[in-house]
Image (spheres, grey):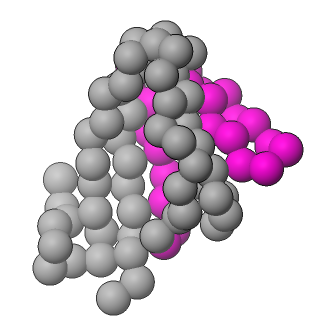
Amino acid sequence: MYGGHDHALRQTLIAILGGRRLDDHANPGEATVHVLHGRVTLVAANNEWHGSPGDLIIVPDSTHSLEAVEDSAVLLTVAKTL
């Protein structure tokens, strides 16, 4: 992986238990969620995107949340403006 605090590209591995969610939060820059394991739902306003292993979800440029339908692991990649 390439990234870190000195670079615009940041990657974070997130594990989340089924039925749990990351509450509404803002998008810090262009971002994607790559589903590695499990199933997730990304929600923004009245829109939902469902992801299964191998799916790549583009994170909208708006407040959103991420819910794990089952125990899941995702790779969040953010290209943060410097």
Residue 9 position, x and y percent, is 30, 69
Q: Quadrant of the C terminus?
A: bottom left
Side of 3 where 79 appears, left or right: right
Please determine whether, in this image, residue 59 is positioned above or below residue 10: above
Horizontal relation, residue 23 to residue 14: left or right: right
User: For this rendering, which residue is in front, 65 or 57?
Assistant: 65
- Location of residue 10 by image quarter: bottom left
Task: Give the total number of marks visible in the rendering.
Answer: 0
**Main secondary structure found in the magenta portion:** strand
Q: Is residue 61 visible?
A: yes
Residue 42 lies within the magenta run:
yes
Residue at (53, 56) in percent of width and height: 25
Report the residue at 55% width, 37% height from top.
Answer: 66
Q: Which span is picked out in magenta?
A: 29-52
Give residue 62's quadrant in the image: bottom right
Residue 74 point in image, percent of width and height: 38, 33
**Seen in the image, is 6 located left or right of residue 54?**
left
Give the x, y percent position of residue 73: 35, 26
Please identify the residue farthest to the right as the structure is shown: 46
Q: Can residue 64 be found in the magenta stretch? A: no
Of residue 33 and residue 62, the one placed in the foreground of this image is: 62
* In the depicted structure, whether residue 12 falls above or below residue 10: above
Is residue 57 among what the camera can see? Answer: no
Residue 54: percent from left, percent from top: 47, 27
Residue 2 sits above or below residue 1 on the image = below
Toward the bottom, the furthest residue is: 82
Residue under the point 79% across and 50% down: 45
Q: Residue at x 80, y 43 (%)?
A: 47
